[in-house]
Image (cartoon, rainbow, N blue to C red):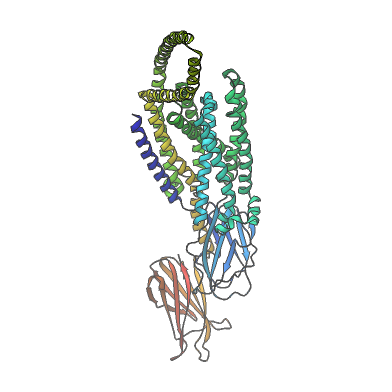
Amino acid sequence: MTQTIAPRLRTLVLLLLAAACALLAGAGPASAHAALTGSDPREGAVVDKAPAQVSLTFSESVSMDDDSLRVLDPRGERVDDGKPSGTGGATYSVKLHAGLPDGTYTVTYQVVSADSHPVAGAYTFSVGAPSETSVAVSGQSAGGGFVGGLYGVGRYVSYTGFAVLVGGAAFVLACWPRGSGVRVLQRVVVSGWLALTAATLLLLLLRGSYTGSGKFADVFDLNLLGEVLQTKPGAALVSRLLLLAAAALFIAVLFGAYDKREDEEKRDLTFGLAVGGSVVAAGLAATWAMSEHASVGLQAGLAMPVDVVHLIAVATWLGGLTALLVALYRGPADTPVPALAVRRFSRVAFGSVIALVVTGTYQSWRQLGSWTAFTDTRYGQLLLVKIGLVAVLVGVAHFSRRWTAQLAEAAPAVAGAAAARRAEKGAGKASTKASGNAKVAQKTSSTTKGSGTTKGTGTAKGSGGSPRAAQLARQRAAVDAARQKRQRDADPNRFGLRRSVLAEAGIAVVLLVVTTVLTQTEPGRTEEEAKAAGGSSAAASAPSTGAVTLDMPFDTGAQNGKGVVRVELDPARVGANDMHLYVERPDGTAFDLPEVKVALTQKAKSIGPLPVAPDHITTGHWSASGVQIPMAGDWEVAVTVRTSDIDQVTISKNTQIG
């Protein structure tokens, strides 16, 4: 039976690792947790004259430096003063140089949201009319590349290490105190501490490059590291390292002084270790709660302690499950996991699940905000996957509880059989010892009759047999241990428990990966608010009538051939529109022209030119109703004016149609 377990275990581990890698690969760089909800000028806008500044509004406060907000002209040169400042709330602006010429300008931003994640993006607006630009706005992202991948791995390892450290120690203290002397459990807890410590150091070194340039060489920049230490995420990572030093002391006591105490003495020390371990575990969990999702947004003061409870419940459940799995598969045969310890863990896991349900419900409401966010946002979809995994995990745990009950019922019979075997073995040893004593007495008698030389030779042979006896003793011990392991594994109840716990642990691996990806995903509430705010800000940036006004100077070169054509398009939306044209001399007086023609073209989609023939209404005024615009986008409005029989000119401007 044990020979069939190993291949199944290897196959399951490979499948789970493949699933974990697939989830991590699909996670990508950290999503923008502070979404851009508005801008002035807005994206794609065409303004008559250059603005004095550019303003961006985010869904939450962000941190930025002199290079975080940049405005580039069509040639890619900066036209801002490089000193972004907050103008109230989550709005930030940067002043522009005076006298900017017409053309398309690019706004780029790379900031760090209040929940520690980098946010980057870019958009364009135009002054006068759109033009060609050498600046590429596609592919703007933050937290990607090789450094971003390493940072993501570090986050996953840190969560895993925390779960194994806290859950393993809780399993020993609350479920199996005698397990403090089991070597494999000691290795599990120490491995969790080492993994969390190494991952924290890695995250601290990568932090500056992760939120900045993304270059691996910047990892070793001490000046950049100093800047990181002054930020909230940097302070949280340093605090985590200090708490890990306290955790190292806790581990030393747990597997040192605590293990050497007798059962009665352990009870007095258990309470102190439980209190101290709980404080350290809560402190470690707080380093995440105070620097990520829970620290910003709605009800942050309540969300942070709830997040601490949630993280500790996850660690107690999944980390304890890991410790139980290792003890069941790799524990010594002479110290099997008792049924009482499994029952205790079952109760601890049940309490953890209750805490997860309560805190998870609150977190879901806080991060989603609506039922539709479950299906319409990536955060909601991942949360549905997590809820499904938890449900499956609880179902598998139900079968583990059944095996535990059967194991507990079979324990007295197994203990009685073991006692009988020990008694039989003791009787056999006594018989062997008596026979040996008789042989020794007979040998002694014969030796006494012999010569002294023979006695000396016998002594030499006896001294030479001591290493051989030790080797035989070790071989007997190994055979006995193998026999005990076979007997332990042959127990159908224990085998069923091991199999169900292995399934639980496998699902827990995938669950932990999904949880890590969730922490890097923009909350559904933020995503929906950004969409709503983006639509409202675009509407607010247009005139209250919804109309677009374009002023186009013209000069046909003839006498009285100069003037300005003003085109008004209302409501500048897809479908039917009203168009008005006004012609004025340079001094502002209206005058008539022999002919005015209009054409609409969208070059990006190769649509047009669509001719428009406006009717003359009064002096200097032409109008056309029901002008059909088939789709949204950037449209060219071309006006042909004729001032005499032979003098005419075509002028144009681009405008955004919503």
Q: Position of residue 310 (x, y in %)?
A: 53, 36
Q: Is residue 166 visible?
A: yes
Name the quarter where the C terminus is drawn. bottom left
Q: Position of residue 211 (x, y in %)?
A: 57, 55
Figure check: 145 above or below 518: below
At 43% across and 39% down in the image, what residue appears? 387
Q: Is residue 377 visible?
A: no
Figure check: 299 above or below 323: below
Name the quarter where the N terminus is drawn. top left
Q: Position of residue 365 (x, y in %)?
A: 50, 41
Figure check: 458 above or below 607: above
Give left or right: position of 317 versus 221.
left
Figure check: 641 above or below 242: below
Closer to us: 618 or 27: 27
Q: Position of residue 544 (x, y in %)?
A: 53, 63
Q: Kindly indicate the quadrant of the structure image that contains residue 483.
A: top left
Q: Kindly indicate the quadrant of the structure image that contains residue 5.
A: top left
Closer to us: 216 or 121: 216
Closer to us: 208 or 285: 208
Give left or right: position of 400 versus 126.
left
Closer to us: 228 or 107: 228
